[in-house]
Amino acid sequence: MSTAEQTDTYQLVETRLQEKLDDGTTRCHLCLWRCKLKHGQRGFCQAHVNRHGTLYNLSYGIISAIETGPIEDKPVRYYRPGSTVLSVGSYGCNFRCGGCHNLEISWGVTALDDLARGESTAAFVTPRELVDTARRHGAEGIAFTYSEPAVWLEYVLDVSKLAKQHDLYTVYVSNSFVTDEALELMAPWVDVLCSDIKSLDDAFYQDICPLSSVEQVLGSIEKAHQLGIHVETRTNIIPTKNDDPRMLAEIARWIAEHLGKDSPWHITRFFPAYQLAHLPVTPEDIMLQTEVAARQAGLEHVHVYVDKGCDCAQTNLPVSTWLDTDPDALHKVKKCAAACCGEEGVLLKKYES
């Protein structure tokens, strides 16, 4: 089935953007990997699997983290300023960033393997339950963050449509390695894109995603802007990786020329983590120099965060804390409720380049 709106139990949901090929393979069109998959294979994100010629999302409704806070924390400053947003994440990403602070959530390899085996005890939350949770906690919007929402698009769309009915806005926090097709599906329902511009160096992007390029990411951001989505961008300055002052000034010029001089740019600080734990914290002077260069390029809304890196969950309260439900029921083992998979479950053969 194409949506789980009709059910209150976990099951695989058909991938919204897929191409079914004559030989039983499928091609996913959610992100720019455009993975071509045989039966039993999962995409690079690990969240979508080919079952007998149909591609399914493993993680529909699966929640890794929930938190409430000001929309400015995303960071978004020029859409509904001062409002409270319910932030929510799942598992899976189409990048492999060496300095990731959300590793267990964002990559989610173990969590997605458990889902594939039918052994997961992760929380399953229907779109309606999530919208009700946002309203109960006084949130005025819902942000899809912590993990890459491109690989969770089916749930993002269903939640966003329901959120509109209850006057809640939605925020999509992304690396923007997404297809035009996905953006066109999102545009009527998603209000805000908060996107990284990590670098203007293809080598930087290809180190975290071999198929990616600067042109693809910038093209997606500009496409979202053209579709009428409110766009705010951010750059996390990493010492020795993307801290060349000329390149940072060029990012500012690109924003001014392609998104407008009034388009916000958020400059955040790198804090050592994972494979980049050996690097220092971003010096404050390069951040302030970048702000000056951005204003010289004509940008009107430039914000520097000396105390902020990624958009990470801070309180890490159990998901059950936020939901009006029994924790034991919430964390029951997840096996797909549909009958199409048979007794063998979902195979674990992964993406092959």
Image (tube, rainbow, N blue to C red):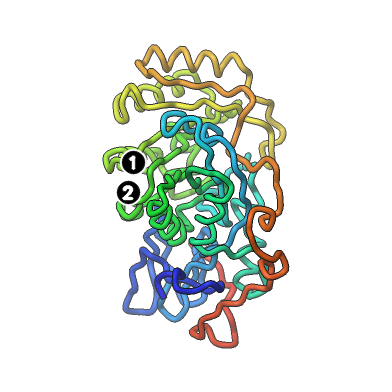
The type of residue carrying mark 2 is: Ala
Q: Nearer the viewer, residue 203 or 328?
A: 328
Residue 91 seen: yes
Residue at left 71%, top 49%?
A: 317
Residue extending farthest to the bottom is 343
Q: Label 1: few (<14), some or many (≥20) within 10 Å?
A: many
Q: Nearer the viewer, residue 140 or 223?
A: 140
Identify whether 186 is placed above or below 50.
above
Residue at left 45%, top 44%?
A: 171
- Residue on which the image places disc 2: 187
* Left or right of residue 316: residue 49: left
Residue extending farthest to the left is 226
Expressed as whole percent of the image width and height from the top left, the position of residue 44 reads 51, 59
Where, by quadrant of the figure, is residue 33 drawn? bottom left
Q: CA distance from mark 2 to mark 1?
A: 6 Å
Along the polypeptide, which appears first: circle 2 or circle 1?
A: 2
Residue at left 59%, top 58%?
A: 63
Label 1: element kind:
loop
Label 2: element kind:
loop
Expressed as whole percent of the image width and height from the top left, the position of residue 40 reads 52, 76
Residue at left 29%, top 25%?
A: 257
Expressed as whole percent of the image width and height from the top left, the position of residue 275 reads 67, 41
Identify whether 194 is placed above or below 96.
above
> Are dots 2 and 1 in contact, CB under 8 Å?
yes
Q: Which mark is residue 300?
A: none
The type of residue carrying mark 1 is: Ile
Expressed as whole percent of the image width and height from the top left, the position of residue 321 reads 69, 54
Q: Label 2: few (<14), some or many (≥20) within 10 Å?
A: some
- Residue on which the image places disc 1: 229
